[in-house]
Image (cartoon, rainbow, N blue to C red):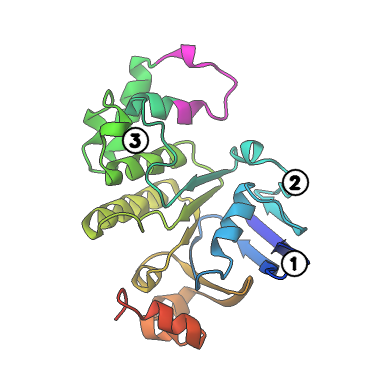
Amino acid sequence: MLHILGAQKTFFSGKPDEKVALDGLNLTLDKGEFVVVIGSNGAGKSTLLNAISGSLMLDSGSIHIGGHDVTRVSVHQRARYVARVFQDPMKGTAAGMTVAENMLLAELRQSKARLRVGLTTKRRDWYREQLSYLKLGLEDRLDTRVSLLSGGQRQSLSLVMAVMDEPNILLLDEHTAALDPRTAALVLDATIRAVDIFKLTTLMVSHNMQHAVDYGTRILMLESGKVKFDIAGDDKVSVTISGLTDHFSVKTDRMLLGAEYA
């Protein structure tokens, strides 16, 4: 489903603050895999997601999604293959529009049809069905402006909008990090249900080691733009937080074992 070969990306090349973000990274994901990506700040996690989504072009290397070479394809054109939910709940939705109008935008993002096709009864029923999977009551708030939703509700809506056309790849960029713990748990539960229902191939970036242990079918650890650690199958089932942190550098280990993991 996803094949990345020799991905190279350097920021500020040739300058004193040169930063190699991806350093010949290779990665293959099979259809339906749910990969949790971990690593310290600056390890290359967000750069990897930006490269896959098309919002950042590689210096060299290639990216194939579903058999299509998308290495030089724009982020807009790549949207037919890739959906993304960001950390900021304010991204991914239009605040001044209703829940239903936002879902219509998401439905038509790959279509040449104009909005005048309208919010038909059939569409509204389908939107209710999609939102009902969240178990957050959003199916009864189709006519509510998104600006009036809580951060968790808005992030949940972004999730539904991302998966409603069943993308080849779903990118989750620390999408629960900005939420309070209770809301984050609700959104994460909704995420797991959506991934399971639609059998989505998923990359989820997280700094939460417990999430890496509890969720997904595979753990990918990045360091200095390279894959340092990659486990799946029985090794993934038996992994522990201490087992993961043993693979971090001393600097990274101190960061991850701060207040959140102490």
Mark 3 vs mark 2: which is more N-terminal?
2
Find residue 166 and report its horizontal and vertical position in percent.
49, 41
Residue 25 drawn above or below residue 89? below
Query: Mark 2: which amino acid?
Result: Arg
Of the two numbered discs 3 and 1 on the same chain, state the one appearing first in sequence: 1
Tell me the CA gap for discs 3 and 1.
49 Å
* Helix, strand or loop for disc 3: helix
Which residue is labeled 1 in the image? Answer: 15
Question: Mark 3, residues whose alpha carbon is within 10 Å: few (<14), some, or many (≥20)?
Answer: some
Callout 1 amino acid: Lys
Answer left or right for 25 relative to 182: right
Q: From the image, which quarter does the N terminus lie in?
A: bottom right
Report whether residue 12 is seen: yes
Q: Which tag is nearer the camera, tag 3 or tag 2?
A: 2
Instruction: State yes or no: discs 3 and 1 in contact (Cβ < 8 Å).
Output: no
Can you identify the residue that label 2 sits on?
A: 72
- Residue type at the position of mark 3: Gln
Helix, strand or loop for disc 2: loop
Q: Position of residue 7 (x, y in %)?
A: 71, 63
Q: Which residues are magenta?
A: 105-118
Q: Which mark is residue 130?
A: 3
Sequence-wise, the earlier of marks 2 and 1 is 1
